[in-house]
Image: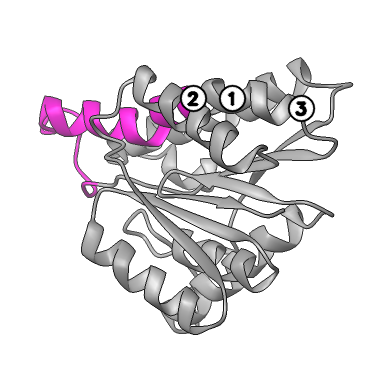
């Protein structure tokens, strides 16, 4: 999903800063965006190990080098598989909660001062179906998804009356492995539709997006 959001926003004119821990994957995404006529920059960062200071540094560099931030998209996901809580490895449980919930919170906190400076900013969180992930065996991923929905409501209320909009977007379907896709069509097509949907929501005169695995900026 994050890759398709990046491509969609790049096609809309965004300069894309790709943020993630898998450099070969980022390089491939970078190449595809540039070959399509877009602009991209790499920013390696591992969400599972990044500290609040790392996110503060990221926000500072965005401000210094790009001058503004106009939105955030959180679409990264950590899903170790369906497992009973009684059998889940403690570190797998903690990692899923951290990557899916704590990291987006920290990243949003770090970037809020920049977002508030924008005349039209957005924070968008990709969320899963609560009726599904609240069932048995969804573990840390399911717990985090419910936390994300709470975060959407809290942050939306706290930022009411400001220029920052907050929303949780649920892709049409999820592929059952913690990744976003569409049942009934090819997985790639599903991610493409979802990516276009996120880009459509974020459309404004000026766009900059930060995702769990990417940062986008547009002058």
Give the mark, 2 or 3, whose residue is nearer the N terminus.
2
Quadrant of res 89: top left
Colour scheme in the image? one colour
Q: Can you give x and y, in whole percent of width and height, for residue 41 in the image?
A: 44, 57
Query: Residue at 68% across / 55% down in the picture?
Result: 218
Q: Which residues are magenta?
A: 80-107
Q: Secondary structure at mark 3?
A: loop
Residue 127 shows up from this direction: no
SS of the residue under disc 2: helix
Give whichever of 166, 183 is nearer the camera: 166
Q: Is residue 98 above or below residue 184?
A: above
- Mark 2 or mark 1, which has the lower sequence index? 2
Judge whether 153 appears above or below 39 on screen. above
Question: What residue would you read off at disc 3?
Answer: 117
**x, y (%) of residue 16?**
53, 58
Residue extending farthest to the right is 161
Q: Residue at x 55, y 40 (%)?
A: 65
> In this orientation, which residue lies closer to the viewer: 174 or 47?
47
For disc 2, the neighbor class at 10 Å (few under 14, some 14 to 19, many from 20) is: some
Marks 2,1: beta carbons within 8 A:
yes
Which residue carries the number 1 mark? Answer: 151
- Label 1 to label 3, Cα distance in Å? 21 Å
Q: Would residue 83 be counted in the magenta stretch?
A: yes
Disc ID at residue 105? 2
């Amino acid at each position: 999903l994050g890759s398709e959001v990046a491509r969609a926003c790049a096609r809309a004119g965004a300069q894309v800063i790709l943020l993630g821990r898998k450099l070969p994957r980022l390089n491939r995404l970078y190449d595809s965006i540039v070959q399509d006529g877009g602009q991209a920059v790499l920013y390696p960062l591992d969400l599972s190990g990044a500290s609040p200071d790392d996110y503060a540094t990221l926000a500072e560099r965005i401000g210094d080098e790009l001058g503004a931030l106009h939105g955030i998209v959180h679409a990264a996901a950590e899903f170790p598989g369906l497992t009973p809580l009684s059998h889940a490895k403690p570190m797998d449980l903690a990692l899923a909660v951290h990557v899916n919930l704590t990291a987006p919170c920290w990243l949003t906190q770090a970037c809020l001062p920049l977002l508030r400076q924008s005349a039209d900013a957005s924070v968008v969180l990709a969320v899963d179906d609560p009726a599904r992930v609240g069932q048995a065996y969804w573990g840390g991923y399911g717990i985090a998804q419910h936390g994300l929905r709470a975060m959407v409501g809290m942050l939306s209320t706290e930022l009411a009356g400001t220029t920052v909009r907050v929303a949780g977007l649920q892709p049409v379907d999820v592929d059952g492995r913690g990744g976003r896709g569409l049942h009934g069509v090819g997985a790639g097509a599903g991610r493409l539709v979802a990516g276009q949907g996120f880009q459509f929501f974020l459309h404004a005169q000026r766009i900059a997006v930060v995702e769990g695995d990417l940062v986008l900026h547009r002058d």
